Amino acid sequence: MTQILDNADALLELAASGNPQALGQLFEHHRSRLEMMVRLRLDRRLQGRLDPADVLQEAYLEVARRFGDYAAGSRDLPFFLWLRLITGQKLAELHRRHLGTKMRSAGMEVSLYHGGLPRASSASLAELLMGRLTSASRAAIRAETQLRVQEALNSMAALDREVLVLRHFEMLSNEEAARELQIKPSAASNRHIRALRRLEEILSHVSGLADSFKGP
């Protein structure tokens, strides 16, 4: 039984047969990747009011509610991408609920690809990268350096930055990223390579980060 439960495909079929524990295990299996997606896309104005765990808790309730339709359908969308879509939609809903009229315009708030997921924040991405700097000597200049990294990230083409987030930080495969961005896999691969080179150029000006960053 343990070997079966270690297999994601077997868990999916168990969940489709009506086993709620299997669905819960599937969600937990993907939790770390979903949490990273939420962490990067959670509006920073909501820090202190919401955290990724809150979003994932609400997302799981929505997943449980809608899973029957997914299981009974064609399953054209791979299960993880379906989970990610539901989680992203719940995040966007929470943004609207908590920010109301403070929401940014749709063109700024939503991502470049289908599904209406909030765009990854360059501030959160810069913060994630700065997390690689832990020495005390860096603490005094961390804020200034993080701002420079954020500004450099904003100078990247939006689609290149999104490919970078999907591939390197959310750990999507090239095929998954291409599907999310609705571009060809070859185009996604080329953009990822270009984005990595640009990121390495950015980090080359920040001592301690360039050596710590390694592409996938």
Image: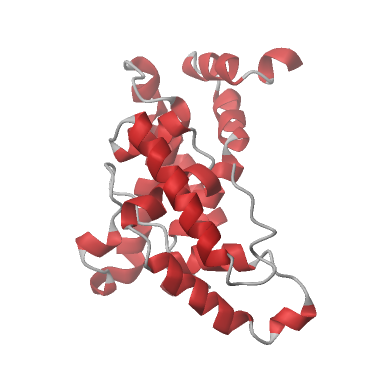
Q: How many marks?
A: 0
Residue at the right extreme?
A: 136
Q: Quadrant of residue 106?
A: bottom left
Q: How is the image coloured?
A: secondary structure
Above or below, 45 relative to 188: below
Left or right: where does residue 99 sit relative to residue 208?
left
The residue located at (41%, 58%) in the rendering is 120
Residue 212 locus on image (x, y percent):
69, 58
Quarter holding the N terminus is top right
Q: Nearer the viewer, residue 178 or 45?
A: 178
Q: Quadrant of residue 97?
A: bottom left
Residue 56 locus on image (x, y percent):
51, 48
Q: Quadrant of residue 45?
A: bottom left
The residue located at (46%, 57%) in the rendering is 198
Residue 185 locus on image (x, y percent):
37, 30
Quarter holding the C terminus is top right
Residue 10 visible in the current orientation: yes
Residue 50 visible in the current orientation: no
The residue located at (46%, 44%) in the rendering is 193
The residue located at (28%, 50%) in the rendering is 112
Left or right: where does residue 135 sit relative to residue 18?
right
Residue at the bottom extreme?
A: 140
Residue 18 locus on image (x, y percent):
50, 17
